[in-house]
Image (cartoon, grey):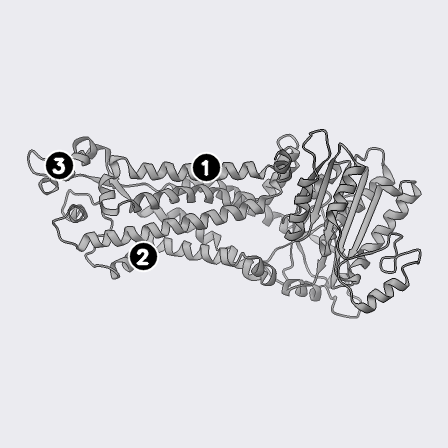
């Protein structure tokens, strides 16, 4: 169990605390509205729906306070890079920021549904109480406020019945109108955030996600109408509702209970969200400031398999291995920012990204860089680029281990290009101070052409390690997961050659998929008593497999071998 918690980056502890706080807030505020005499008469009108509306409202405030924090990338990068306040375990927890962001979003959706359904009943019963016969307690309470010197408890003051009365509340009252708007905004944000929409229609996801501005504005002013009302403290001192409700027809008469007075609850949401909103505003200002700094594209390289490499320079730009940046190309879109892993090493005098052409935005960038033309593109004709970052990821911790497993699937190999380049530079200059002693590198790809742009780097590393009599430092396995019959025949014919027919490397390309259980057991046997970092940039299915193998192949004994799973998230 302990190792499972470690592999989850302590997220199980965070999730339990977060869920516990949600349960506590729901129960606390439910009781706060379902028991105290202050809301006795409000409960007469609305029943248990009052507490069922207010309890999720408190949880909404709490989760809306949290929802912006995981996307404050600069704040997270600062915390991640600060060893004084951020241990390795905490950094690994910060790497799961988007997972936590999604969890909080679903919790917001759940409490919004409960809150909305409860208020639908509240509105129906409030409207009904205004038009029913005056002989009931609910009718008498609803009529309070019609005469001078009386304060109302029923916010609905018209005498129009349902369903027209309910629609009137929904579209003319501040609480109703803002409720409709923020619910619609939330539905659009969540439905456009599905994996299918994000991958196939990223622009739809990008633009609808910015409805969060409308959502938060509506959220802050939603309670300004003060439609939830309770008896005032002064009125409670002279009018005990648990005794006086029996004689409601005699209220205000001499020798009887005085007419109760009511007031609305002040809006509280702004107190919950003002801090995170300020932090996020600062975050966006920092992003804007950095996006205005000049970026120069020094080189554009066209690689096979619809991949281009952009080499860039920016004054004051400093990076670590495995980090990523957000890129905007105004010539393609003035608003869209897209994340890309840096493929250059910190030791190089430029920074680079590899972009696979898979959508409208990347196709636009491809054309803007002149890659669709045969003739040479002049540097001054290259488009302007804005860059925000770099931001930290799990791969930064590669050099914290003596032994690591690096697993990249397809274009997911890009963060490890930065790692392997940095290893190469460190070996050239100062290998003695390098804590990392052994790298197991796995690359899974469907198409042979995808290997070409990465082969030169592996060849350089292979030669460097052999020159220093340390060829065992890097063990790499390249798996081709897709091929046709003609390719298979060609591979068989050339299998006995000294170098691989695809990559030109001495290590031959393997076909199919790795047997991960065997790989983990073999590595565990070669490094007893070690903490082995497992780093993945690839699909969720592969992440689940590697995480399970990391857990099952780690020993319960703290002195035994432990696999620590890390996944890229951005």
For label 2, count other residues whose C-alpha is less than 10 Å away and answer few (under 14), some (14-19) or many (20+). some
Q: Which residue lies at the image location 73% right of the left edge and 31% below the top edge?
A: 560
| Residue 21, numbered circle | 1
Q: Position of residue 327 (x, y in %)?
A: 65, 54
Tag 1 secondary structure: helix
Front residue (pair 315, 56): 56
Residue 40, above or below 124:
above
Viewer-nearest of discs 1 and 2: 1
* Quadrant of the drawing holding the N terminus: top right
Q: Are marks 3 and 1 in contact (CB under 8 Å)?
A: no
Instruction: Give the percent coordinates (x, y) of residue 22.
Output: 44, 40
Can residue 337 be seen from the camera position used here? yes
Q: Relative to 291, is 24 on the left or the right?
A: left
Q: Secondary structure at mark 2?
A: helix
Splitting the image into 4 quarters, where does residue 44 fall? top left
Gap in angstroms between the C-alphas marked 3 and 1: 41 Å
Q: Quadrant of residue 43?
A: top left
Which is in the foreground here, disc 3 or disc 1? 1
Alpha carbon of mark 3 to alpha carbon of mark 2: how far?
A: 33 Å
Q: Counting other residues with Cα less than 10 Å from the Cα at mark 1, is it few (<14), some (14-19), or many (20 or more)?
A: some
Real-space CA distance between mark 1 and mark 2, rounded to the nearest whole angstrom? 31 Å
Name the residue carrying label 2: 170
- Residue 235: give its label: none
Residue drawn at (53%, 42%) of the image:
69
Task: Say which residue label 3 marks.
Answer: 258
| 170 up-or-down from 534: above or below | below
Mark 1 and mark 2 in contact? Answer it, CB < 8 Å: no
């Amino acid at each position: 169990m302990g190792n499972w918690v470690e592999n989850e980056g302590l997220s199980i502890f965070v999730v339990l605390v977060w869920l516990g706080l949600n349960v506590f807030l729901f129960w606390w505020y439910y009781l706060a509205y379902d028991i105290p005499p202050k809301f006795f008469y409000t409960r007469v009108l609305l029943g248990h729906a009052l507490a069922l509306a207010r309890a999720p409202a408190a949880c909404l405030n709490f989760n809306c306070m949290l929802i912006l924090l995981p996307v404050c990338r600069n704040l997270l990068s600062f915390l991640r890079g600060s060893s004084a306040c951020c241990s390795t375990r905490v950094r690994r927890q910060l790497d799961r920021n988007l997972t936590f962001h999604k969890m909080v979003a679903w919790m917001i959706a759940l409490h919004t549904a409960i809150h909305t359904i409860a208020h639908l009943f509240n509105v129906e019963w409030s409207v009904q109480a205004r038009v029913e016969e005056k002989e009931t307690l609910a009718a008498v309470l609803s009529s309070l406020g019609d005469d001078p010197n009386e304060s109302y408890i029923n916010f609905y003051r018209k005498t129009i019945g349902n369903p027209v009365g309910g629609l009137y509340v929904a579209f003319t009252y501040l609480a109703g109108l803002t409720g409709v708007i923020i619910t619609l905004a939330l539905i659009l944000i969540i439905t456009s955030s599905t994996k299918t929409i994000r991958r196939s229609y990223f622009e739809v996801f990008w633009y609808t996600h910015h409805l969060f501005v409308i959502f938060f504005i509506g959220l802050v002013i939603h309670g300004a109408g003060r439609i939830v009302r309770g008896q005032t403290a002064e009125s409670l001192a002279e009018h005990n509702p648990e005794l006086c409700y029996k004689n409601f027809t005699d209220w205000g008469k001499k020798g009887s209970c005085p007419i109760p007075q009511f007031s609305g609850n002040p809006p509280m949401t702004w107190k919950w969200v003002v801090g995170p909103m300020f932090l996020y505003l600062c975050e966006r200002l920092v992003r804007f400031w950095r996006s205005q700094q000049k970026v120069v594209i020094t080189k554009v390289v066209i690689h096979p398999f619809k991949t281009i490499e952009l080499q860039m320079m920016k004054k004051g730009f400093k990076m670590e291995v495995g980090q990523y940046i957000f890129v905007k190309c105004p010539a393609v879109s003035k608003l869209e920012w897209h994340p890309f892993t840096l493929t250059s090493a910190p030791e190089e005098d430029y920074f680079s990204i590899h972009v696979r052409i898979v959508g409208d935005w990347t196709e636009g960038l491809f054309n803007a860089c002149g890659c669709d033309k045969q003739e040479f593109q002049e540097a001054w004709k290259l488009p302007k680029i804005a860059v925000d970052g770099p931001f930290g990821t799990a791969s930064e911790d590669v050099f914290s281990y003596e032994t690591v497993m690096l697993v990249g699937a397809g274009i997911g190999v890009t963060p490890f290009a930065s790692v392997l380049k940095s290893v190469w530079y460190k070996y050239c200059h100062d290998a003695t101070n390098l804590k990392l002693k052994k790298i197991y590198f796995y690359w899974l790809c469907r198409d042979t052409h995808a290997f070409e742009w990465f082969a030169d780097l592996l060849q350089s590393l292979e030669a460097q390690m052999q020159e220093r009599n340390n060829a065992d430092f890097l063990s790499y396995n390249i798996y081709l997961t897709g091929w046709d019959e003609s390719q298979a025949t060609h591979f068989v014919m050339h299998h006995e050659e000294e170098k691989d027919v695809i990559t030109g490397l001495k290590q031959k390309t393997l076909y199919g998929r790795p047997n991960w259980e065997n790989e983990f057991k073999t590595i565990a046997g070669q490094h007893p008593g070690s903490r082995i970092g497992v780093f993945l940039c690839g699909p969720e299915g592969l992440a689940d497999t590697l995480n399970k193998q990391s857990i099952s192949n780690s020993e319960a004994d703290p002195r035994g071998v432990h696999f620590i799973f890390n996944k890229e998230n951005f």
